[in-house]
Image (cartoon, rainbow, N blue to C red):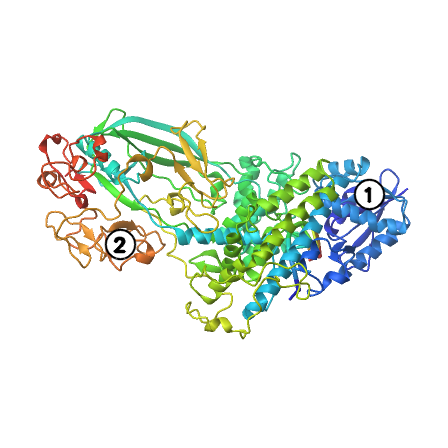
Amino acid sequence: MHVLCVAEKPSIAKSITQILSGGQFNIRTTSNKFIKNYDFTYRTHDTYTVTSVAGHLLAFDFNSAFRGWNSCDPLTLFDAAVEVKVPEDKKSIEKNLVSEARRTQMLMIWTDCDREGENIGMEIVQICRKSNPNINVKRAKFSAIIPQQIHNAAQHPVELDKAQADAVDARTILDLRLGAAFTRMQSLSLQARFGQLSQQPISYGPCQFPTLGFVVSRYEQVQAFSPETFWYIYLSLRTTVPSSSKEDPEDVEFTWKRGRLFDFEVSLAIYEGVVTNPTARVTSVTQKPTKKWKPLPLTTVELQKSGSRLLKMTPKKILDISEKLYQQGFLSYPRTETDQFDPSFDFMSLIQKQTTDTEWGAFATSLQDGGFTRPRQGKKNDNAHPPIHPTAHVANLAGDEKKVYEYITRRFLACCSKDAEGWETTVNVTCGREEFYSTGLQIIERNYLDVFPYDKWVGKHIPEFKEGEEFIPTVCELKEGQTTRPSYLTEADLVGLMDKNGIGTDATIAQHIQTIIDREYVVEKKEGSIKYLIPSKLGIGLVEGYNKIGFEKSLSKPQLRRETERRMVQICDGNTSKQEMLNQSIEQYREVFLRARNEFNQVISSVRRHLEGRPPDENMPPDQGPHNDDDDNNPGNPPNAQPPTNKPPDGNRRGGGGGNGGGGRKPAPPPPEPNSRDDFGIASGSLSRPSQVDSSGNSDPTEVLCKCSVPVVERTVTKESANKGRKFRACGNQGGCDFFEWMDIPSSSSVASVTVPTKRMRSQTTSGGGGESSSNDLPVKRCKCDMTAVEKTVVKEGINKGRKFWTCPNSEKARCQFFEWGDEGTKSAPAQVLSQDRLKTNDECFKCGQSGHWSNACPNTGTSSNKTGNRAFGSNTQSNTSGECFKASQSFVLFSTP
DNA sequence: GCAAGGTC
């Protein structure tokens, strides 16, 4: 019997030929320069020809009556006749199949084992039946190109899965219809009004728009962010060393277990409690081994994410380079969802190939000499390809190719190494009734870190403490901080969001990002070494406009695509038919389309507002009349839209208001300051409280949203730890962002009815021009807005990194020019450190300025804060009977031991 | 000139 085997791509055809033939085969060229036919006799004595296609063979398109952009009302594209044909560039492949099929009894499909593979398989069958209608069809099922699996697939073939193929057909037709309908409608309508948009189509697609939506959504969060002030207790101890010792004393910082509070009064009351009895007592000292896990085997998405972050290349470029390295035989197939290696994977021969490298060769050798440990198993397996790994050693690469190859190789070797091991010490202390902790880390074995410099793990020394030991902290301060605005989306963030939300596949995610850049919906902006994605005026205008229409399921959010995906799964499971799914989905999108077209004024005015910089004009007169279905004379335009303006192409430049001069697809206003860290030294992302913004940019006071604009979810810590049982709020979008908030840390709205003032009460005598207050006893930093300055730390790489400075507490837009280094100036102690003596001499209530009572018992304000009771404040020996009261501006740092 | 999904 003669068997014709057809793989999805030439490389697979070659690989399976090598395995099945045992290396004994003949090669015939075809009229396609990539496709070869391999002939041999298999062990079953059947003669085999192995060939391939190159992805899909067939393409859908509207038939000629509907192909021209002005040939029909875009609405009709939801029903227009669709034809399927072999595109010109695939004709040579078709010809080869027709010719090979003619002389064969069995057709065996060797495409990838996924939905697309089943669909491509059906396409191959369709073509082969042209010349051999009765050909017997089988499907070889394999998940890795290893001899055992390939022989098994050849000897135990199965049937093609028509349901999976149908699911792909349904999606293909749906995407064509809705993509073309929306693209023509919005392009024709907007281009008629805005000449500067006529250069290229204003495309809509069910993947590209949600991708744009992620970028715009983050942009809106950044714009809507307003910083919130919080307070926390900072405790530290400077160790004493014998005078004979050459060691320097060190500062041990203790972190407040409450983290931070957003209510000043509550913070102050708690702080008062601490300084009343500031003796810290060590409640426990625990030491335990800890690990930093080695990375997981590499998938395409992970390569693009980490590559974009670490190698500073676009996901598209990384994928293109990987593809090239794969074709040269240096890498395994770079499009894979699999993060687990097959049990029979031959690690050692691959490690052997790397031992000659000048940089990581020694490490590879150490893996051979007993250092090897099986890679971790991830949870994903596409059953088609292994994780990305180097297949050969190559030393003569340069530039970006070298970077990509090196990353993949180091990652592979890291996977084959051991986790890094360390020893973690945690010292828990109580001070007053509050709990604090400090941790230290000693790295014992670096292991994989030696070959994987992309991961950092830094040890931290902590002096020895004993349980029960008591000490007086050197510093006990109530510090103020501010939440920092979230940063714009990076490409790595976007890849992650798309992956999590099912937008695109591993092979297409990078393309969708490139599409929204090519369409000028989004521009890349470099801040330091990080590339951020910022929506253009057009991008914001489109998303904002559609959001204003207020669809139940937004065109710029992932829900609709997820529904399509769900319906595809239903087809695969046999729960619905291709036609039924298409009917449902087309109906759904047709309704969305009609509404979008009827209310397209919203999009037009939103785009106009952003392009021409006009102020929001909600009162813009509605366009002419309701939609008229008979209006087919000008089918591209929403019939109810305003007539095209007669503006010249640069008309928007005269639009005034924005002053952006160039018009066209300019990026949105400049970004805020680069992401900063606050006094905790925690990246701002984790400290940012989410701005509560709905899809239309309006505040929603009732719902807490995460950074993806999705309602947060409440969870409980289940892992064995100090926080077990503790509740927290997290991203409601399957981990799409890093939003995190403890629920037991009260927010200003839930703890006290007193509104925390943004400007605190202050001393009557202040300096107006920024700097310190004029109070002799109590230096207080004041900015030029006459607000209490905040202390921040430089995090940007440079000679000032780690240096503290004082700045205006306002958000960037409102911030004054006040700036002062924390370690300069004569009067300025780094913070307002008060001696205990001083505490006793300043006796005004911070709220009313009068003596004789404490702020939390102030009779001159609301009583809500009285629930904390009178507390001694600033003295560890005296109670509130002293009757001292303090000004707020002096309340930040009250305690300092000599 | 439209989509998304394969692959070159």
**Residue ID at (41%, 48%):** A699
Q: Is residue A310 visible?
A: no
Question: Which labelled disc corresponds to residue A464?
Answer: none
Q: Is A604 placed left or right of A121 in the picture?
A: left
| Mark 1 surroundings: few (<14), some (14-19) or many (≥20) residues within 10 A | many
- Labels 1 & 2 near each other (Cβ < 8 A): no
- Occupied quadrant, residue A718: top left
**Looking at this view, is A28 or A571 the one in front?**
A571
**Residue ID at (79%, 54%):** A36
Q: CA distance from mark 1 to mark 2?
A: 71 Å
Are discs 1 and 2 both within one chain? yes
As drawn, which residue projects farthest toward the bottom?
Answer: A648
Which quadrant is the C terminus of chain A positioned in?
top left
Q: Is A775 placed left or right of A70 in the picture?
A: left
Q: Is residue A694 visible?
A: yes
Callout 1 amino acid:
Met
- Occupied quadrant, residue A372: top right
**Residue ID at (24%, 38%):** A265
Q: Is A507 placed left or right of A463 in the picture?
A: right
Q: Nearer the viewer, mark 1 or mark 2?
A: 2
Q: Chain of mark 2?
A: A
Secondary element type, mark 1? strand
**Looking at this view, is A348 or A331 the one in front?**
A331
**Looking at this view, is A495 or A194 the one in front?**
A194
Name the residue beneath numbered marker 2. Answer: A807
Q: Is A768 placed left or right of A1 in the picture?
A: left
As drawn, which residue projects farthest toward the front?
Answer: A625
Name the residue beneath numbered marker 1. Answer: A108
Q: Chain of mark 1?
A: A
- In the image, residue A885 lies at what x, y percent? 13, 38
- In the image, residue A465 lies at what x, y percent? 27, 29
Callout 2 amino acid:
Thr
